[in-house]
Image (spheres, rainbow, N blue to C red):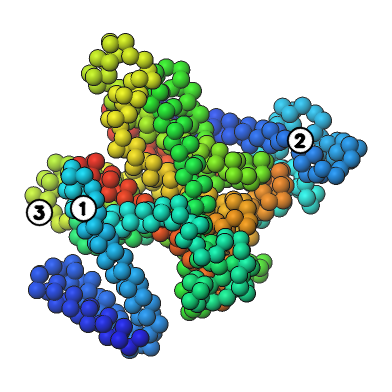
C-alpha cells in the first residue's frame, strides 16, 4: 500500500510539472487541486479517502489503457474507409465499444466462460472472494462470477429483444407516418402522445400487476413503452427526407410506400436511427433492471443483474460491496453505450459548438 | 394578451384530455384481466359462491362504464375505493404517504434546480476546457447509471464507512425538522445526483446554442466580460428551454422516486405501489398510477406553459 501511495503522489507531481511546462492552465488547476487535497487528507488523518482515490485512479488508468490498446488494435481489423474514424475515436468511445464487445461475447459464450452453473449451489452463502470463486458467492452460495456471466446473457438478451421489437415497430410506424401522412400519421401520433404521457416505470408496473411477470409480458411492455420515442424520431427525420427531390422522382416512377421506406428513406436516416437504437437500449435496459430490482422482472433462479442487486442488498449494511458488482455491471454497460452514442451524435452533427 | 391566454387554455384543455384518456387506460387495463378481479384475487381454489359473493361485495356485477364513472368521480374527491387485501379505504392509506413522497421530491428539487442551473452556466462559460470535458463524462455517467447503483454507492460511502447519514429513512411522527432533513438526506441526494446531471447538460446546451448569435458577438466586441455576457445577455433568452427541462426533470423525479423509496425503505407512495403490485391489490395500484400519471402530466403541462410564458415575443404581442 505504501508503494501505491508513493506512485500516486509521484504521478500527480509529474502531471503537475508537465502541465506547467506545457502551459495548460486548466490542467494545472486540476492536478494542483488533487495534489494539495490528497496531502491535506493525509495530514488530517483521512487516509481512507486517499486510498479510495488511489483505487479509483487505478481503475481509471487501467480502463484508459485498455481503451487505448483497443483503439490501436482495432485499426488493423477495420476496412480502409474506417481507419480514419478509428484513429480519431475519443478514448471514451473506444472504451464504450470495448465494453459492449466484451459484454456481447460474454453473453454469447456464457456457458463456456462461467466456471459453474447459474443456479448451482457450490459453497456456503455469502462466501468471500477467493481463487475459485472470483467474486465470492451470493445469499444461497451460488458463484457470483458465473451468475454475472450468465446475467450478461439473460438481462442483456432480454433488453436487446425488447429494444429490437420497440425499434422495429417504432421505426416502421414513424417512417410510414412520414411517407403517408394523413389519418395514419394523426392516429399514430396521438397514440404515441398518450403512451408517453404516462411515466414509463408506472406504466410497466400497472401492466405487470395485471398480466403477471413473464418474459413475454416484460418484452411487450418495454417495447410498447419505448416505441413512441423511436416513432417520433423516425417520423421527424423521415419528414425531412420525404421532401427531397429523389423521393419525388421515385414516386413518379410509381414506387410503393414500402419501397420508398426501405430503399430511399432508410439509407438516408441510418445515422440518427442507430444512435437512437443505442439510447433506447439503455432506457429499456434500465427499465428492466429497475423492474428486476423491484422483484418484478426475470424470476429466480435465472441469473439477472437487477435481481442480483436485490438479493444481496442486505450485505450493504456490513460495508460489503457484493451487491455493487451486478449494479456496476449495469451501470458500466449503459455508460459505455452512452459514450458511443455521444460520439456518434457529435460526429453526425458535424462538430457543432 | 388574448393570444397567450388562448394558447395556455388550449394547453390546459389538452392536458385534461390526456389525463382523462390515461384514467380510462388505467381503469380498463384491469378489466383486461384473464377472468376478472374476483377470480384473480381469490385464486383457483375458490368456489363459485365465494367468487360470486366477492363480485357482489366490490360491485363487479354492474357494467364497467358505470363503475368507471363512479371510480373517477370518487378519485376527484380523494376516495379511491377499498383495498382488496386489508379492506381499509385506499384514500387514507395514500394520503400520508403521498405527503411523504412530495416532501422527498421537493427536498431533492430545492437542492437540484439551483445547483444544476448554476453549474450549467459555469460549464457553458468554461466550454472546451478540460473541466467541460470531465463534466461531460461525469454527467453522462450519472445520467446512465441506475438509481439504485447511485443509492448503494452513497450508502456505502456516506453511511456505512463514515457514518455521516442514516442508511434507512424511517420516519416517525415526532421528529424535528432538522432531524427529518438528516434522515432523508441520502434518498434526496440520490435523486439530486440523477436529475442534476441532465438539467446541467441541457442548461449548458441552451446557453451554448445562443452564443453563436450576432448580438452576443456584439456584446463581446464592446468589451462586456464573459460572465456578464452569459448572465445578462444569454440567460434571459435561454430561460424557455431551461424551464422546460427543469419541469421535465421534476416529472422524471416522480418515476425515480419509486426505486429510491424502495432502496431506502422510505414510507412513500412509490413503495406502496410496488407492494400493491406484488400483492395484486388493484384499487391501490390504480390509485397510485393515477396519482403518478396526473403529476407527470401536470409537470409536462407546466413545462409547456412555462415555455410560453418565458417567451417575450408571445408575452408582449405587437
The correct choice, above or below, for A3 with respect to A176 in the image is: below
Q: Secondary structure at mark 3?
A: loop
Q: Secondary structure at mark 2?
A: loop
Question: Closer to the observer: label 1 or label 2?
Answer: 1
Q: Is residue B179 left or right of residue A85?
A: right
State the residue at coordinates (9%, 54%).
B223
The correct choice, above or below, for A7 with respect to A141 in the image is: below
Which labelled disc corresponds to residue B223?
A: 3
Q: Residues within 10 Å of mark 2 (few under 14, many from 20)?
A: some
Which labelled disc corresponds to residue B36?
A: 2
Label 1 marks a residue whose chain is A
- In front of the other: B179 or B60: B60
The correct choice, above or below, for A35 with respect to A207 in the image is: below
- Please tell me if label 3 and label 1 are on a single chain: no
Q: Quadrant of residue A90?
A: bottom left
* Distance in Å between CA atoms under marks 3 and 1: 51 Å
- In front of the other: B83 or A141: A141
* Distance in Å between CA atoms under marks 1 and 2: 62 Å
Label 3 marks a residue whose chain is B
Viewer can see residue B19: yes
State the residue at coordinates (10%, 70%).
A22
The picture places residue A245, in percent across and down from the top left corner, at: 22, 18
Viewer can see residue B165: no
Q: Residues within 10 Å of mark 3 (few under 14, many from 20)?
A: few
- Quadrant in which the N terminus of chain A appears: bottom left
- Please tell me if label 1 and label 2 are on a single chain: no
- In front of the other: B105 or A141: A141
Disc 3 and disc 1 in contact, CB within 8 angstroms:
no
- In front of the other: B173 or B160: B160
Q: Which residue is mark 1?
A: A76
Amino acid at each position: 500500500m505504501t508503494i501505491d501511495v508513493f506512485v500516486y503522489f509521484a504521478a500527480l507531481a509529474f502531471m503537475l510539472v508537465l502541465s506547467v511546462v506545457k502551459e495548460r492552465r486548466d490542467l494545472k488547476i486540476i492536478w494542483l487541486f488533487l495534489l494539495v487535497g490528497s496531502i491535506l487528507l493525509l495530514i488530517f488523518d483521512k487516509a481512507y479517502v486517499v486510498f479510495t482515490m488511489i483505487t479509483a485512479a487505478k481503475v481509471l488508468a487501467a480502463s484508459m489503457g485498455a481503451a487505448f490498446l483497443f483503439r490501436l488494435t482495432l485499426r488493423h481489423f477495420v476496412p480502409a474507409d474506417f481507419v480514419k474514424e478509428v484513429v480519431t475515436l475519443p478514448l471514451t468511445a473506444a472504451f464504450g465499444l470495448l465494453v459492449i464487445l466484451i459484454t456481447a461475447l460474454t453473453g454469447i459464450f456464457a456457458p463456456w466462460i462461467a466456471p459453474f452453473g447459474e443456479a448451482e449451489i457450490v459453497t456456503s452463502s455469502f462466501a468471500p472472494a477467493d481463487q475459485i470463486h472470483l467474486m465470492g458467492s451470493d445469499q444461497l452460495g451460488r458463484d457470483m462470477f458465473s451468475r454475472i456471466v450468465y446475467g450478461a446473457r439473460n438481462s442483456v438478451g432480454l433488453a436487446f429483444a425488447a429494444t429490437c421489437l420497440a425499434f422495429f415497430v417504432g421505426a416502421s410506424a414513424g417512417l410510414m407516418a412520414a411517407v403517408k401522412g394523413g389519418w395514419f400519421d394523426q392516429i399514430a401520433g396521438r397514440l404515441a402522445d398518450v403512451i408517453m404521457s404516462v411515466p414509463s416505470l408506472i406504466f410497466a408496473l400497472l401492466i405487470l400487476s395485471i398480466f403477471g411477470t413473464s418474459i413475454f409480458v416484460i418484452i411487450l411492455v418495454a417495447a410498447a413503452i419505448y416505441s413512441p420515442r423511436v416513432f417520433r424520431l423516425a417520423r421527424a427525420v423521415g419528414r425531412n427526407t420525404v421532401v427531397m427531390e429523389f423521393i419525388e422522382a421515385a414516386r413518379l416512377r410509381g414506387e410503393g410506400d414500402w419501397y420508398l421506406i426501405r430503399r430511399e428513406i432508410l439509407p438516408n436516416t441510418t445515422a440518427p436511427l442507430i444512435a437512437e437504437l443505442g439510447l433506447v437500449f439503455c432506457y429499456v435496459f434500465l427499465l428492466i433492471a429497475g423492474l428486476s430490482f423491484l422483484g418484478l422482472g426475470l424470476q429466480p433462479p435465472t441469473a439477472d443483474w437487477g435481481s442480483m442487486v436485490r438479493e444481496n442488498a442486505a450485505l450493504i449494511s456490513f460495508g460489503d460491496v457484493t451487491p455493487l458488482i451486478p449494479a456496476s455491471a449495469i451501470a458500466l454497460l449503459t455508460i459505455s453505450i452512452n459514450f458511443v452514442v455521444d460520439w456518434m451524435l457529435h460526429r453526425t452533427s458535424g462538430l457543432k459548438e | 394578451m388574448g393570444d397567450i391566454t388562448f394558447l395556455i387554455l388550449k394547453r390546459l384543455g389538452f392536458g385534461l384530455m390526456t389525463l382523462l384518456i390515461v384514467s380510462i387506460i388505467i381503469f380498463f387495463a384491469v378489466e383486461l384481466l384473464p377472468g376478472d378481479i374476483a377470480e384473480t384475487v381469490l385464486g383457483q381454489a375458490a368456489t363459485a359462491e365465494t367468487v360470486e359473493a366477492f363480485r357482489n361485495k366490490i360491485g363487479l356485477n354492474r357494467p364497467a362504464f358505470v363503475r368507471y364513472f363512479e371510480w373517477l368521480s370518487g378519485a376527484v374527491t380523494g376516495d379511491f375505493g377499498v383495498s382488496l387485501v386489508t379492506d381499509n379505504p385506499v384514500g387514507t392509506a395514500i394520503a400520508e404517504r403521498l405527503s411523504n413522497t412530495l416532501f422527498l421530491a421537493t427536498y431533492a428539487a430545492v437542492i437540484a434546480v439551483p445547483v444544476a442551473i448554476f453549474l450549467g452556466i459555469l460549464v457553458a462559460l468554461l466550454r472546451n476546457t478540460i473541466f467541460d470535458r470531465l463534466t461531460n463524462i461525469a454527467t453522462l455517467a450519472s445520467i446512465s447509471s441506475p438509481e439504485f447503483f447511485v443509492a448503494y454507492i452513497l450508502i456505502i460511502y456516506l453511511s456505512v464507512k463514515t457514518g455521516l447519514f442514516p442508511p434507512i429513512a424511517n420516519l416517525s411522527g415526532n421528529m424535528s425538522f432538522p432531524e427529518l432533513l438528516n434522515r432523508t438526506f441520502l434518498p434526496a441526494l440520490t435523486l439530486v445526483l440523477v436529475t442534476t446531471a441532465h438539467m446541467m447538460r441541457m442548461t449548458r446546451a441552451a446557453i451554448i446554442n445562443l452564443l453563436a448569435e450576432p448580438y452576443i458577438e456584439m456584446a463581446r466586441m464592446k468589451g462586456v466580460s464573459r460572465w456578464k455576457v452569459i448572465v445578462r445577455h444569454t440567460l434571459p433568452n435561454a430561460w424557455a428551454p431551461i424551464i422546460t427541462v427543469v419541469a421535465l426533470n421534476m416529472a422524471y423525479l416522480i418515476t425515480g422516486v419509486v426505486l429510491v423509496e424502495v432502496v431506502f425503505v422510505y414510507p412513500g407512495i412509490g413503495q406502496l405501489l410496488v407492494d400493491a403490485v406484488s400483492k395484486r391489490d388493484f384499487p391501490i395500484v390504480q390509485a397510485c398510477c393515477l396519482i403518478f400519471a396526473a403529476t407527470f402530466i401536470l409537470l409536462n403541462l407546466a413545462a409547456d406553459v412555462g415555455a410560453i410564458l418565458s417567451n417575450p415575443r408571445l408575452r408582449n404581442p405587437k
